[in-house]
Image (cartoon, rainbow, N blue to C red):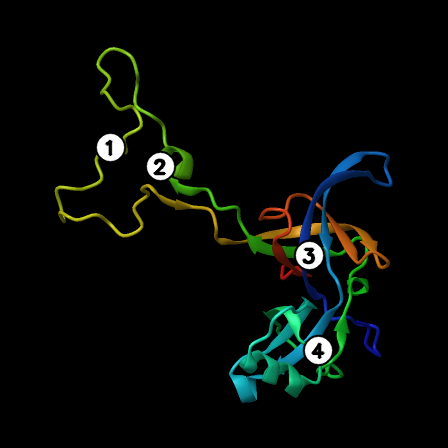
């Protein structure tokens, strides 16, 4: 989406395709992650005065089934129902941004520095060695039977487990942001963005690409 002042809103939702490699201008092989980002529709513009914060609600994909509440929301915006509805908070709202506008991959250019947010791969319930990189106990003479036990978790005083103690638990499946990735490829025909480096989440998962905050 290009505005009259040639400044685009640099935030778009898409899907992670996977990793590949390309040759940069210096002739070096670099690993890139390909992100498919079909045009996003602006469904709602939230303001501080009305909603308490500033955000842009974006929709992408074609919906197969839509509930009555969602259908009314899309009807109010005057757009066709979408498969996924997400929003991204912004510090400043573009003056000429309005409901129904499209956000496309041409908002980004090669060389831009971006942050990519996704949901990391879920690894299920994991012990402390896998989850927190703990060391196991020794297997040699004098070692205890189970070498992967956590060990002591309590204390003599104040006789409780401190909040935030590293223990076994759910590993992965959380929101992760990889910061300051450089855009190496923008294909406006295929609606694909390529960024140098790894992006959180499995293939086909939803990610948001936005201009780096720092």
Earlier-in-chain disc, 4 versus 3:
4
Front position among marks 2 and 3: 2
Identify the secondary structure beneath mark 3.
strand
Earlier-in-chain disc, 1 versus 3:
3
Q: Which residue is mark 4?
A: 80
Earlier-in-chain disc, 2 versus 3:
3
Front position among marks 4 and 3: 4
Q: Which residue is mark 2?
A: 127
- Based on the displayed image, in which of its 4 quarters is residue 56 positioned? bottom right
Question: Residue 151, labelled with which disc?
Answer: 1
For this orientation, the residue located farthest to the top is: 141
Is the Cβ of the residue at disc 1 closer than 8 Å to that at disc 3?
no
Earlier-in-chain disc, 4 versus 2:
4
Residue closer to the observer: 120 or 109: 120
Identify the secondary structure beneath mark 4.
loop
Q: Position of residue 171 (x, y in %)?
A: 42, 44
How far apart, in angstroms, are the residues tagged by discs 4 and 2? Answer: 46 Å
Residue 46 seen by the camera: no
How far apart, in angstroms, are the residues tagged by discs 1 and 4? Answer: 57 Å
Earlier-in-chain disc, 1 versus 4:
4
How far apart, in angstroms, are the residues tagged by discs 2 and 3? Answer: 34 Å
């Amino acid at each position: 989406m290009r505005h009259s002042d040639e400044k685009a809103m640099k935030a778009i939702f898409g899907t992670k395709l996977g990793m590949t490699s390309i040759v940069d201008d210096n002739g070096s092989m670099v690993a890139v992650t390909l992100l498919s980002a079909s045009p996003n529709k602006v469904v709602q513009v939230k303001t501080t005065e009305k909603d308490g914060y500033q955000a842009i609600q974006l929709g992408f994909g074609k919906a197969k089934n839509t509930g009555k509440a969602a259908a009314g929301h899309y009807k109010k915006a005057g757009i066709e129902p979408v498969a996924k509805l997400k929003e991204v908070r912004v510090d400043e709202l573009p003056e000429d941004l309005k409901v129904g506008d499209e956000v496309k991959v041409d908002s980004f250019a090669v060389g831009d520095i971006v942050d990519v947010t996704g949901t990391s791969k879920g690894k299920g319930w994991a012990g402390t060695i896998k989850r927190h990189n703990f060391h196991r106990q020794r297997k040699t003479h004098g070692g205890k039977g189970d070498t992967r036990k956590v060990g002591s978790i309590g204390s003599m005083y104040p006789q409780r487990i401190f909040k935030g103690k590293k223990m076994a638990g759910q590993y992965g499946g959380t929101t992760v942001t990889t910061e300051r990735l450089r855009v190496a490829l923008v294909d406006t025909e295929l609606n694909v963005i390529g960024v140098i480096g790894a992006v959180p989440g499995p293939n086909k998962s939803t990610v948001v690409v936005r201009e780096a905050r720092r």
